[in-house]
Image (cartoon, grey):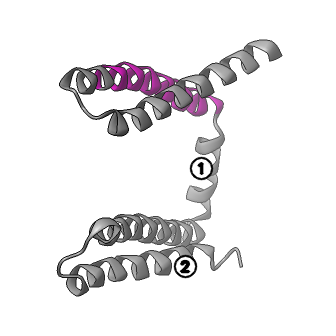
Amino acid sequence: MKKAKHTIIMFSGLILLIAGLCFIKIFTEPQGFMRTLPYLCIGIGCGMFSHGLSKIINKRALKKDPVLAKQMEIEINDERNIEHANLSKAKGFTMMTYVFSALLLVYAFMGVSPKILLPFVIAYLFVQFYALYHRLKIDKEQ
């Protein structure tokens, strides 16, 4: 089953992609959710297809070159690379916090409906509290 996982993901993505394209042709005047369903299928299908295909190609390339496979495994598990990845994620999170809060304020001043704005505020607060929870958890461990 593990060997076929990426193949299943790839073909599922292809099926979703084709289904989305067919929905666009079939429904000439869609209403409600059916207006977004084809594009949702296309987006998710493209992502699944490319992810599955890249994993298959990566595995085949690494199978042919064991030296490269060992080098990539060392690089992935290298503490310095992990630290750099975590630092870049932290910088990205900090930037996202400022940009997202500024965008929320702009939308609020523009008079956007609370029905539209409230889910974004809830999502923003959820992410901030999640980060705070993990910060407190990490501080407590040390």
In which quadrant is the N terminus drawn?
Answer: bottom right
Relative height, residue 81 to residue 8 (above, below): above
Instruction: Give the x, y percent position of residue 141.
Output: 82, 17
How many numbered markers are drawn? 2
| Mark 2 residue crowding within 10 angstroms, few (<14) / some (14–19) / many (20+) | some
Where 109 sits versus 9, above or below?
above
Which residue lies most toward the right here?
141
The span from disc 2 to disc 1 (Cα, nearest Å) is 25 Å
Instruction: Give the residue at mark 2.
Output: 7
Q: Residue 71: give its label.
A: 1
Residue 82 percent location from the top left of the image = 60, 33
Is residue 40 within the magenta segment?
A: no
* Foreground residue among 47 and 118: 118
Amino acid type, label 1: Gln
Please state the horizontal and vertical placement of residue 33, each as a whole percent of the image.
Answer: 34, 66
Q: Quadrant of residue 49?
A: bottom left
Disc nearer the start of the sequence (2/1): 2
